[in-house]
Image: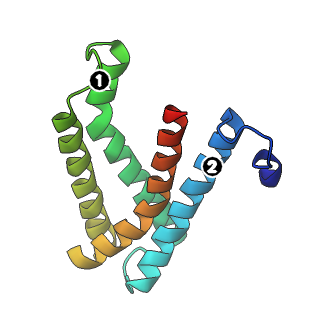
Amino acid sequence: MIFLLFQEGQDPFSEESIFITFVIMFGLALLLLKLGLVLTKAEVRTGFKWVLISFGTQVGIFFFVGGPVMLLGFSGEMEGGPPVVLIIIFIFLALFMGINVLNVMHQLGMKRALIVFLMMLIPFIVVDVILIMLIVS
């Protein structure tokens, strides 16, 4: 089914292909989180249940921190979008909190938590590139 969506002649940015790409990238991020925990030799809370809890907490924190900006944007309060400085501040704050969640939940240490977080960030960068390509086209 996935190959049918991405065949030549099909619209690569149709709603179905974007949805399936998002689901695949979230699954890949979960697998990379688990792989990162194995590679960094984490000893605490490495079961798949804890990986799901950790991933869900990180996504929830990102949306909690970025929620006010999203709500203001959806309500039309920011004409032309939020200021770039505000976006950068919220992104760094959310990323810092995500790394700290990894550190606290799995007791990795900041260096190893950063390595795991960067591994987990790869699929989300791919999704961002897809969204930018969708907006530009």
Residue 134, by quadrant, is top right
Q: Which label belongs to residue 81? A: 1
Q: Position of residue 57 (x, y in %)?
A: 38, 52
Q: Which residue corresponds to the image point at 67% horizontal and 46% vertical from the top-left? A: 20
Can you tell which of label 1 and label 2 is closer to the viewer?
Answer: 1
Q: Can residue 109 be seen?
A: no
Residue type at tag 1: Gly
Q: Quadrant of the C terminus?
A: top right
Residue type at tag 2: Thr
Q: Which residue corresponds to the image point at 22% horizontal and 57% vertical from the top-left? A: 96
Q: Position of residue 33 (x, y in %)?
A: 46, 69
Q: Please say if 120 is above or below 66.
A: below
Q: How many numbered marks, from 0 up? A: 2
Of the pair 22 and 4, the residue shown nearer to us? 4
Q: Please say if 96 is above or below 87.
A: below
Q: Which residue corresponds to the image point at 37% horizontal and 19% vertical from the top-left? A: 74
Q: How is the image coloured?
A: rainbow
Q: Can residue 7 be seen?
A: yes
Q: Is residue 30 left or right of residue 11?
A: left
Q: Position of residue 1 (x, y in %)?
A: 83, 50
Q: Please say if 56 is above or below 115.
A: above
Question: What kind of element bears circle 2?
Answer: helix
Q: Which label belongs to residue 97? A: none
Q: Is residue 135 left or right of residue 100?
A: right
Residue 19, by quadrant, is top right
How much space separates mark 1 and mark 2, taking CA atoms? 26 Å
Q: Which residue is mark 2?
A: 21
Residue 102, by quadrant, is bottom left
Task: Check disc 2: other Cα within 10 Å, few if <14, some if 14-19, many if 20+.
Answer: some
Q: Position of residue 105 (x, y in %)?
A: 32, 67
Question: What kind of element bears circle 1?
Answer: loop
